[in-house]
Structures are given as C-alpha cells and as structure tokens.
Amino acid sequence: MVTAVERDFEREYDKLQKLEDQTKKLHKDMKKSTEADLAMSKAAVKISADLLSNPLCEQDQAFLDSMTALDTAMRRMDAFNQEKVNQIQKTVVDPLKKYSSVFPSLNMAVKRREQTLQDYKRLQAKVEKYEEKEKTGPVMVKLHQAKEELRPVKDDFEAKNKQLLDEMPKFYQSRIDYFQPSFEALIRAQVVYFTEMYKIFSELTDQIDQAGLTDEQRERETEAKLTELRALSIVADD
C-alpha cells in the first residue's frame, strides 16, 4: 500500500519541485532583463550627452542640431523605458517573487508528512515483527500495544497524505490562472514601449537624415574621409 501511495505522491511533488525551480529561474531572468534594459537606455543617454559635448558642436551648427535631436530622443527613450520597467516590476517580477514565497510552506508540509511516514513505517514494522512470532501471552500483549501505538500515527499520516494529494494538483494547476495576467501585462508593456520607440526614432530620422543617403552611401563617404585622413603626413607610417 505504501509503495502505491509513495508513487502517487512523488509524481505530484516532483511536478511542484520543477515548478519551483522554473519560477525561481524565471524571476531571476526577468530581473536581469529589466536591469539590462535600464542599463541600455542609461548608456544611450550617456553616449548622446557625450556627443553633444563634443568640440565639433562648437563649430558646426548642423552637427549640433543633429546631436541635440539625438539627445532628446535618447532621453525620451529612457523615460519610456523606465516606465516599461516599472510596469514589468509590478506585474511580472513582484508576482513571481510572491509565488515563489509559497513553496517553503509547501516543502515544510512535505517534510512533516515524510517524518510521519517514517514513524508509520517503523511502527508498522514493529507490529509485523510481533505478528510473525509465536502467539504467546506476552507477545499478544506487545502486539496489541504496538497496534494501539500505530493507529494514531497511521491516521495522522493518511490525513497529511490525503491533504497533500488533494491540494498539490490544485496548486500546480493554479499556475495558469496566476501567471496569465502577468504575461499578458508583459506583452502589453513591450508593445506600448516599442510603439513609442518607433515614433521617436521615425521623428529622429526625419530630423537628422536630411541628405537621404543610404547606409551603403554613408559607409563609402566615411571610408573616403578616412582615406583622406590617412594621407596626412602626421598619421603616415614611418
């Protein structure tokens, strides 16, 4: 009987252990993702600020205008990114952390069940030992005492086991209803953010791409300028 009970229990508990590991990993990955997002937009703002303070801006109004437009766009991007990260923190990261906080109580209940099971097995073995002996008066007394000692432990184990076998599948199934709103919110936050990014960078392109050159044309133009620089005597190889 215990073997069949253990098989059912281990199957359900194994699913919850995997769920716990996956939830912790997802929480860790989401935190890393939001931290990387913030670092990215902060770095972009730093780059645009450095470009804006470049000495070229002191002499070239067109360059100054372009860098000013870039700096404004990067700061807008950073603001929207901060808003997105805050939203993800509230709707995804925090719920993941709260969900993970339930598992220690579950694991403690499993440990209590395991302790009761060990007591149950020990007392069951004691009963079986007396049952195998010759049925003398003293043996029958000890057998009766062993059965009396076993009964409450057996009842306790069966109650703990039944409760866990009833509730573990329900807890496992609840993950869908719990996390679905979180991941829908994650998608919405990303959609809003990238929609705004499209607007910001479209406006930026209109402001700085007045020449209308393609990337290939810009690359050739840059290479030509670099060739001219290399021809200067101050950078010529000895």
Image: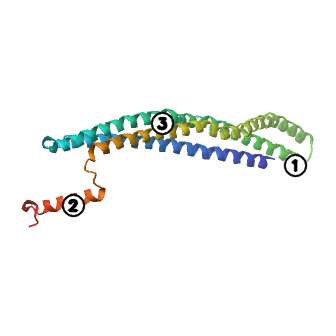
Name the mark nearer the viewer: 1 or 3: 3
Mark 3 or 2 closer to N-term?
A: 3
Left or right of 223 on screen, residue 4: right
Q: CA distance from mark 1 to mark 3?
A: 65 Å
Point out the frontmost of discs 1 and 2: 2
Image coordinates of residue 106 in percent, x first then y, are 64, 37
Residue tagged 1? 132
Within 10 Å of the Cα at label 1, are there few (<14), some (14-19), or many (20+) other Cα atoms?
Answer: few
Query: What amino acid type should be assigned to the residue bearing mark 2?
Result: Glu
Whether residue 50 is visible to the viewer of this picture, yes or no, is no
**Residue at image point 66% right, 41% down:** 172
The residue where tag 3 is placed is 88
Amino acid marked by disc 1: Glu
Q: Quadrant of residue 127?
A: top right
Q: Nearer the viewer, residue 83 or 28?
A: 83
Numbered mark located on residue 207 in the image: none
Q: Amino acid at mark 3?
A: Ile
Of 237 and 230, the residue lying toward us = 230
Tell me the element at label 1.
Answer: helix
Is the residue marked by circle 2 packed among few (<14), some (14-19), or many (20+) residues within 10 Å?
few
Quadrant assignment for the C terminus: bottom left
Report which residue position mark 2 lands on: 223
Q: Position of residue 42 (x, y in %)?
A: 33, 39
Of circles 3 and 2, the one toward us is 2
Nearer to me, 162 or 76: 76
